[in-house]
Image: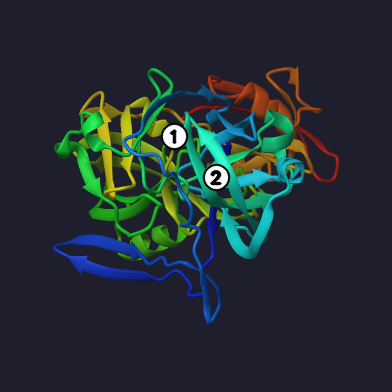
Amino acid sequence: MWLLSVTIKYIYAEENNYFKMMQKNILVIFLMMSFIQLNKAQEFSLNQGGTTQKDYYSVIPFEIENDKIVVKANIENIDYRFIFDTGSSNLIFKPLYEEIKLNSLTKISCYDGNGKIDSLAVVSLDSITFGGITFKNIPTAVAENNIFSECLGIDGFIGNNMLRNSIVRISLKDKTIIITDNKRKLNLNKSHSTKFYFDDPVPFITVMLKDKTNARDPVLFDSGANDFYSLSLSHFIYFQERDVFNDSLKGFGSNSYSLFGVGKDSFQYRLTVPEIKLEGTKFQNVTFNTTSSPDSHIGLKLLDYGIIIIDYKNKKFYFEPFKKIVNMQAKQLPFDLTFQDNKLSIGIIWKDKYKNQMSAGDQIIEINDVNYENYNICDVLKNGSIIKNMVKLKLKLKDKTGLIKIVELERE
């Protein structure tokens, strides 16, 4: 597995704090978040601007490109391509910024899906029309070109600060997003709903992890992440200290790419838990990895199992499942992929028996006799995972000294 996350989140003056409490053998973590702080005396909020339209209802088609929701939005009578990302605020890439000449508001620090920190300029997007709904004066970050803009021709992200007064329904079955400000126009089932944890446009909800004991994890629903569930490394450490998990696999390396590039090499964990519960739906035998991001998240794969409605306006999250019980048991490859120096490489090795045969950072020359020596990140973005359906693999690898190795392995 190789994760591509477009999520970007903003750093606040006060560091994120985790309040821990034990209640009837259930563990709870609360993540405190506040507005962006420019300095001790001044606050800047991205929650500005919006639409003056009332009683709107729009059905917007989308495409899926490498597990990303790609939509069109219109600026100055020209259609541009955006990733629809509930885990991010609005963002545009540098070429669009230079084309439409926007007024700068400020500069802020932010972190991406790997927890990497950088500073971005924030501009005021004068007018953007999405699904026939016109939004004005939306604070929008500006990022340098990266693989999403260069490989997929993406101009930016439609994010949660622009949607904060709307109700959003996402269906993968018919590839549509519905945006409205009137909940009566949607057939909402209260039994499928939960409240957001915070008075903020970022939709944090709670999932229940069931292993040796039960644990509640506050998660971000992040449509920009292409996996099902990832557990924040800081949350994992907290849970591990309280003996929540039966066992885990430990690996070192990197296996994800986000806005500011490939994640830093670090110790990460892979776990399989008997059950993850989300609003009455039981996901059984779920395998997932930790993430270096401060936030745990539920990603786009949740849409394989139901319809999602994010009621930003009334601070509620709905999940309408296709089935009440989903068995996600599947054999896993004992390694993850990554890219180093734009070369397809071994990211993290999960099984000890292979750690003396290959190392994180080994370049992949061939997989099952097919050459991937010149395969690059754009190839992955355009073609998707090359090992997704493979059960047995014969890898031809080149380590950092130039030594060629052959490693044979299979899903376990």
Give SS at disc 1: helix
Answer whether residue 348 is visible to the viewer in this image: yes
Q: Does residue 322 appear left or right of residue 51 in this picture?
A: left
- Whole-angstrom CA distance, mark 1 to mark 2, is 30 Å
Q: Residue, x 71% and y 33% (percent of image)?
A: 377
Q: Depth check: 9 or 268 in front?
A: 9
Q: Depth check: 108 or 9 in front?
A: 108
Badge 2 amino acid: Asp
**Which mark identifies residue 352?**
2
Q: Quadrant of residue 3?
A: top right
Q: Farthest residue to the right: give it.
A: 402
Q: Residue, x 28% and y 34% (percent of image)?
A: 284
Badge 1 amino acid: Leu
- Residue 1, given in percent of the width and then of the height, sits at 55, 34
Give above or below for 122 relative to 388: below
Q: Depth check: 383 or 276 in front?
A: 383
Q: Disc 1 marks which residue?
A: 300
Answer whether residue 5 is visible to the viewer in this image: no
- Residue 253, given in percent of the width and then of the height, sits at 63, 50
Q: Residue, x 42% and y 44% (percent of image)?
A: 52
Give SS at disc 2: helix
**Which mark identifies residue 157?**
none
Q: Does residue 366 appear left or right of residue 204 in this picture?
A: right
Give above or below for 97 relative to 197: above
- Residue 381, given in percent of the width and then of the height, sits at 65, 29
Q: Residue, x 68% and y 59% (percent of image)?
A: 104
Which of the marked residues, 1 or 2, is nearer the chain's N terminus?
Answer: 1
Q: Nearer the viewer, mark 1 or mark 2?
A: 1
Q: Depth check: 55 or 95 in front?
A: 55
Q: Residues within 10 Å of mark 2 (few under 14, many from 20)?
A: few
Give above or below for 86 relative to 323: below
